[in-house]
Amino acid sequence: MQGLEVARRWYETAGAPMLEREFGDVVGRIAVGRAGHGSECFGFDDEVSRDHDFVTGFCLWIPDEDERDYGFRLERAYAKLRKEFPPEGGAETTAGSELGEAEHGVMTIGTFYRRHLGFPGAPQDWRQWLHTPDHAFAEAVNGAVFRDDLGAFSGIREVIRTGMPEDVRRKKIAARAVFMAQSGQYNYPRCLKHGEPGAAALALDEFVRHAAQMVFLLNRRFAPYYKWVFRAMRGLPILAECSGELEALLTRPDPPETKTDRIEAVCAKIAAELRGQGLSACDDAYLEPHAFEVQGSIRDRELRTLHIMDG
């Protein structure tokens, strides 16, 4: 059983009764779920995931203004619950990187979002939407919320999940398109002609990264941390087949001409989707003209006049 389901069952069988019994007067203000760092929050955990930085548990998110009233008491109750009624089928390891520390237990709503995004809630302007890494947004909206009567935590999640301004999405798409053109369609073959296979490999890596991010943007989704990109892409409704093409560029020992053909095939699919979404009317197979056309369609003047590679 995967970690998210174990956490949900543990909450339903042990956590929920504890909250009702000991925090009945404020339980409606406590959001419960599992989200943030960790493969289990994306539903991608397996046996390998359990060898480090893996803790079975759930999160209790409380309003910032409530922390002084019952935050410490709630922390003690959660710690006691873990000790006396550990999750059945759960797992816990402590070895690993401090950067991968799993999130569970009590934290304020503002702390959760600040930890992932750098600010205590949904983005307030286009700059925060544009410059916050997509993998940070992905961690802010992954997992599941088991209970949120107040709706404060879930409301922020929904704004993040669906609220990216279309102008920002277009700016990100324009940047991805120009990077794909530069790295894959232009620099990869040129580096090979220069006799620089290492530089060509770096160009190929750049192309794959930006192409993957482009696919997520065209799906109106956030690309997760790089090690989960291909896994997540395979489940997307649009251009999921590109995951195999992009993974092959990195893993198959194909000759350069085969890799070049594969790059062009991916770019052709991206160009077709750009036209299909009304983002570009350009017929060119090269993605750079598409990038400038997408950027030219941005309504906000300040965003529209940023450098094409910004985003």
Image (cartoon, rainbow, N blue to C red):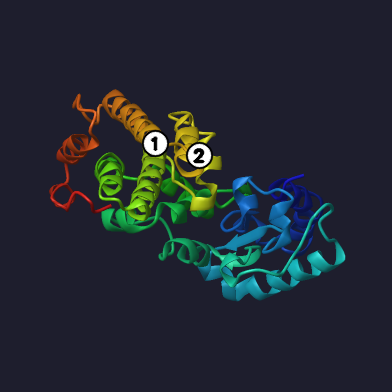
- Residue 117 position, x and y percent, is 43, 61
Disc 1 to disc 2: CB gap under 8 Å: no
Judge by depth and name the residue closer to the eye, 25 or 102: 102
Q: Residue furthest front?
A: 195
For the N terminus, the quadrant is top right
Q: Amino acid at mark 2?
A: Arg
Residue 286, which numbered label? none
- Residue 302 position, x and y percent, is 15, 52
Q: Is residue 150 above or below residue 54?
A: above
Q: Amino acid at mark 1?
A: Lys
Q: Which residue is mark 2?
A: 252
Quadrant of res 61:
bottom right
Q: Which residue is mark 1?
A: 259
Judge by depth and name the residue closer to the eye, 276 or 56: 276
Badge 2 marks a residue whose secondary structure is loop
Q: Is residue 275 above or below residue 82?
A: above
